[in-house]
Image (tube, helix red, strand yellow):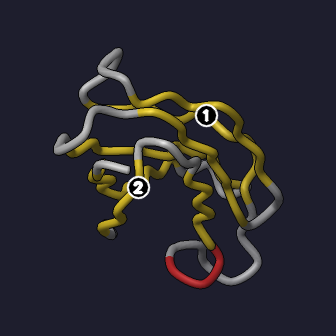
Amino acid sequence: MSAYFLKNTGSDLDHTFEWAAQILDGGETIESDLGWTLHPADDGLIIDATNHSPTTTTVRLSGGVPGRAYLVCSNIHTSTGREIQNSIIVRVANG
């Protein structure tokens, strides 16, 4: 499942995936956060912080090149042994 977000270059963007509402099976939880990835990598958008709970993962993004779009992916390992990825598209605007 992907979503599209607009981010200003001068401000941070916090995004939380609510895995239980969308992807996790009943009773399944996030066992470990396998990390976040950016595509393209090393192109101005920065992962400043991450966090997770048994049912959510959160990222704080800063920077980015105006006009550029980035694929931001969260990767998890669940209590049932599944490895799952969820992503958003972030477009950076002037400002």
The answer to which of 44 and 76 lies nearer the viewer is 44
**Residue 44 picture quarter:** top left
- The answer to whether 25 is drawn above or below residue 68 in the figure is below
Q: Which residue is pictured at 70% across the width and 63% down the height? A: 56
- Which dot, 2 or 1, sits closer to the camera? 2
Q: Which residue is pictured at 67% across the width and 55% down the height? A: 57
Query: Percent position (x, y) of residue 84?
Result: 47, 52
Q: Amino acid at mark 1?
A: Leu
- Which label was assigned to residue 34? 1
- The answer to whether 9 is drawn above or below residue 46 in the figure is below
Disc 2 to disc 1, C-alpha distance:
24 Å
Dot 1: what SS? strand
Query: Percent position (x, y) of residue 50?
Result: 70, 40
Q: Amino acid at mark 2?
A: Lys
Q: Which residue is pictured at 41% across the width and 52% down the height? A: 8
| Residue placed furthest toward the left | 67
The quadrant of the image that shows the N terminus is: bottom left
Dot 2: what SS? strand
| Residue placed furthest toward the top | 42
Crowd band around label 1 with a 10 angstrom C-alpha radius: few (<14), some (14–19), many (20+): some
Q: Is residue 7 left or right of residue 15?
A: left
Q: Is residue 93 left or right of residue 55?
A: left
Q: Is residue 7 left or right of residue 35?
A: left
Query: Percent position (x, y) of residue 25?
Result: 60, 78
- Which label was assigned to residue 7? 2
Q: Earlier in the sequence, mark 2 or mark 1?
A: 2
